[in-house]
Image: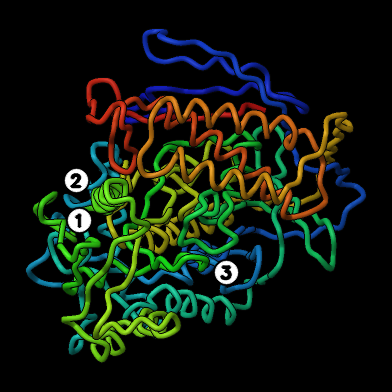
Amino acid sequence: MGGFNGRPFYVYIFQSRLKSFSSLNWHTRGGLNQMEKKVETHRYLVQMDTRELGHLYTDCLIIGGGVAGLRAALAAAQQGQVHVLFKDTMSDSNTYYAQGGIATVQEPDDSLEDHINDTLKTGVGLCDPAIVELIIRGGPQEIEQLRQWSMPFDMNGSKPACGREGGHNHARVLHAHGDATGKHLALCLLEQVKQHPRIKIFEHCFSIDLLTEQGRCLGVLCYHPTHGYQCIWARRTVLATGGAGQIYRETTNPNGATADGMAMAYRAGAVLRDMEFMQFHPTTLYIAGAARTLITEALRGEGAKLIDRRGKRFMPEYHEMAELAPRDIVSRIIHTELAQSGETHVFLDIRHLGRQWLAEHFPTINELCREFDIDVDKEMIPVRPSAHYMIGGVKTDDHGRTNIEQLFACGEVAASGLHGANRLASNSLLEGLVLGDIVGRTIAEELTHNGDEAKHHHIISDIPDSPRTKLDIADVTNSLRSLMWRNVGIVRNGQRLEETLEIIDLWCRYVMDKVFDDPAAWQCQNMLTVSRLMTIGALSRRESRGVHYRSDFPETDDKNFQSHIEFSHAV
């Protein structure tokens, strides 16, 4: 499977037949502990006979409509017909809600080598250097393409203006309308997609499972509230389903970020990598009873300060870069401050910048503060960390290929090798653009040399009725999110992780054996699947590295752990 330097440190192989996992032999290097875990699951989540379902056919099927999926669609459509599936609406993606910008070199005092070095340093030894170079060097070209498509970048004269964010040693982050970069990037790409004669868009289409046969991906089984279950058969399929933030009670992610792509890829036999690495954003608005909303790092780049309840600025005591230290460090320091004080939040102080400045430079945050009656001329903004970005995901090569033939992945659902153990601020939109383009062009090239058409295959999923008690799905989902936040969050330890795995296994026995006819239940099953892998990964990595911090193993251990943890569910 190949991990860091070609060798994964741990590899968990889940051998499976149609109906259940076999025993998992869970071990650490040197055979320190061995425990058998058995959790029932099924290859597909629902009963089906593909002969009895409706069918659509396309050259390229893209599941997900964020930056990576849309960019891939535009590139793939150069050669074939493309279908893009949105789980909800076209505005329901992490891209659309992204306040941060696109990191890429634009200024003469900056260099691609410096951007590469900042990325490698932030990734703490687990980045793939070749992938880092590929993506960083591809950035300027993608920015130029966006400008040709009328992306409304904030400008400094004739060039896009550059801001600075955490972990960057130069100002190289491009924005659009201040803190609305993701929204305008999504709208820019959607406008191009809508105009393209070979791209079709389907909203409110829940992708349940990848359809596979003999190690090849043939398309997807999906559900639409009007049309019911359908099979979409494709010559090439791209997972671009985004992240897993909704696994946590506190998150910046939209409701649709429930790890669906990772879970369906895992059931299909794809290799998942680095599942223990979830990035927590240090500053999200804390209002009791309200959803967490991102307060962009760019504010700190412009001079906002983190203040404790006593009115003291605390970051310089911990790190030389103060508020602009990498996100994992800032999040962990805030977590420590809150644990010591017993408070629910710290504060972001922009009083010296003022309300008028905020309205001009960060209109989205200004409106948010107005909504909650926060007068930034006189008051500080209450903030705390929240789950923000899933670094791990489906393992891919430098063209976005997975280990399953004809299946690609890009964007947050993928583990490309760019981020390592911690993502450098604003590298995610860059990754989506560059790798989305590469995936689309790779597919276009393959379609050129492969004249086969997408066709129907006969697949049956026959799942026996479960005699076990049914649990309340909403209750399990909410309890899982709280459990993950408490025990697999910013700070972790072995005892809590073992308890978490026991609890998740209990829920799995009573949820994964059932057949549901409801997207909320499918999401719960996907969240349980991925949460379990994240917990095992966090328990196995007995060190602290990047966003993964173990209080019982607080040091980074390059000798034993400068490598990747991979999961494979062989079918």
Disc 1: CA contacts within 10 A as few (<14), some (14-19) or many (>=20): many
Where disc 3 sits, the SS reads loop
Q: Residue at x 67, y 71 (%)?
A: 200
Q: Is residue 128 above or below residue 99?
A: above
Eyeballing the image, is 560 above or below 64?
above
The answer to whether marks 1 and 2 mark residues whose Cβ atoms lie closer than 8 Å is yes
**Which label sits on residue 92?**
3
Residue hosting label 1:
167
28 with respect to 204 (left or right): left
Position above or below: 387 against 149: above
Graded by Cα atoms within 10 Å as few (under 14), some (14 to 19) or many (20 or more), the crowding at tag 3 reads some
Instruction: Return the x and y of residue 133 as percentages of the image width and height.
Output: 25, 50
CA distance for labels 3 and 1: 28 Å
The amino acid at mark 2 is Lys
Which numbered disc flags the more N-terminal residue, 2 or 3? 3
Reading the chain from its start, which is encountered first: label 1 or label 2?
2
382 is higher (above) or lower (below) than 486: below
Q: Residue at x 27, y 53 (%)?
A: 334
Looking at the rendered structure, the kind of residue marked 3 is Asp
Q: Which residue is mark 2?
A: 121
